[in-house]
Amino acid sequence: MQLREPEFTLGVEEEYLLVDRATRDLVSDPPAELMRECARLCGEQVSPELMRSQIEIGTTICRDVAQAEAEIKRLRGIVAEVSNRYNLAPIAVSTHPFARWMTQKQTAKARYVDLTQEMQATARRLLICGMHVHVGIADPELRIDLMSQLSYFLPHLLALSTSSPFWEGENTGLKSYRLTVFGSLPRTGLPEQFVSYAEYERHVDILKHAGLIEDASRIWWDLRPSARFPTLETRIMDVCTNIHHAMSMVALTVCLMRMLYRLRRSNQRWRRYASMLINENRWRAMRYSYDAGMIDLAKGEVIPFRELLDELLGFVAEDAEALGCVDALGHVNDILVSGTSAHQQINVYDAAIAAGKSSSVALQDVVDWLIAETVRDI
């Protein structure tokens, strides 16, 4: 039976941190009027997050990458404009360069209160942000099949999006420290592999029946079938500070899914690899971003990331044409030229230190760069 091609609609969620423009530190208790004004202008597309110093935006269901980009630009712009009225600013980044998690206040929302009660310190230290990309795939069986195949490419997506090199004033040596924090929660990391949607549901039902989770939204894998929408949700990526980088990652995500769908339509599929092998690349992405290459699992060799990316872009060129996102996808190459947000943050810090500034002032310079870069070109 000929498969009906999915619509490959898009929904993008970004989480930002709110900083005080004077101190560059997080504002642990932003004025309630700020969120009310954002809600008045954006409706349910802007919402609070676990920490009061966080704010989340989400697009509507978008027909293509261009529409998603227009919405992200609009929402970033509104949050920045409203925040500026209170001498605050949003930064699109996955960790703050020097803020302390212990000084943060949590949002008084039942879901977050329950989470913290259950997870204790592992939840209280979740001072991290991510970007989630939903791709509309109505057939649940196809969602499960593509989930198992797309897992191979999750480290590549992380490597291109890293933005969390600093944690509580320290250069961690990792380009994505965020995942070390998030990984302390249960039901995180690479997704399990299932042969059918029914098998996936049976496993979820065991956890629900045992009273461990209310629903599948408490499964926080790097990639999962959404519990709320008929989508496959990619969650591994850090928040991209630069808007063009962010949208190139959206384009790459949806193009990869369409490429894998094409293979299935031709009775082919991407080879499945053991999680232990994919996790090696996942760690390399966390540690180095793209700097030290990745394992080509078919060859069993570490290959320069540039070679892997060129091959990958060749795989999805047809899909970028079909989805109308050739230009957006092209900005992936810009990331390797200018560096991810993590690379650029470290460069700003190192330049400040070389200029004779103290570590604390250098970290403030990083925040200033993040404030400017978040709204550049929107």
Image: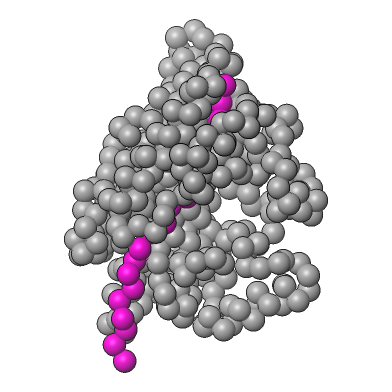
Is 344 in front, or is 200?
200
Above or below residue 104? Residue 359 is above
Point out residue 353 in the picture as x, y percentages from the top left corner: 49, 14
Residue at 35%, 63% (x, y): give it: 9
Relative placement, left or right, of 107 versus 130 is right
Point out residue 174 in the picture as x, y percentages from the top left corner: 54, 39
Point out residue 22 in the picture as x, y percentages from the top left corner: 55, 14
Residue at 45%, 30% (x, y): give it: 80
Please provide the residue range marked out in magenta: 1-20
Point out residue 113 in the picture as x, y percentages from the top left corner: 76, 49
Quadrant in which the C terminus is drawn: top left
Residue 183 visible:
yes
Residue that extends furthest to the bottom in the rendered view of this protein: 1
Q: Is residue 11 magenta?
A: yes
Marks counted in the figure total 0
Q: Is residue 376 magenta?
A: no
Is 224 in front, or is 342?
224
Relative placement, left or right, of 284 versus 269 is right
Residue at 50%, 40% (x, y): give it: 40
Is 183 in front, or is 64?
64
Residue 17 visible:
no
Residue that extends furthest to the top in the rendered view of this protein: 356
Is 306 in front, or is 233?
233
Residue at 36%, 46% (x, y): give it: 71
- Report the coloring of the rendering: one colour
Above or below residue 116? Residue 299 is below
Quadrant in which the N terminus is drawn: bottom left
Relative placement, left or right, of 244 versus 202 is left
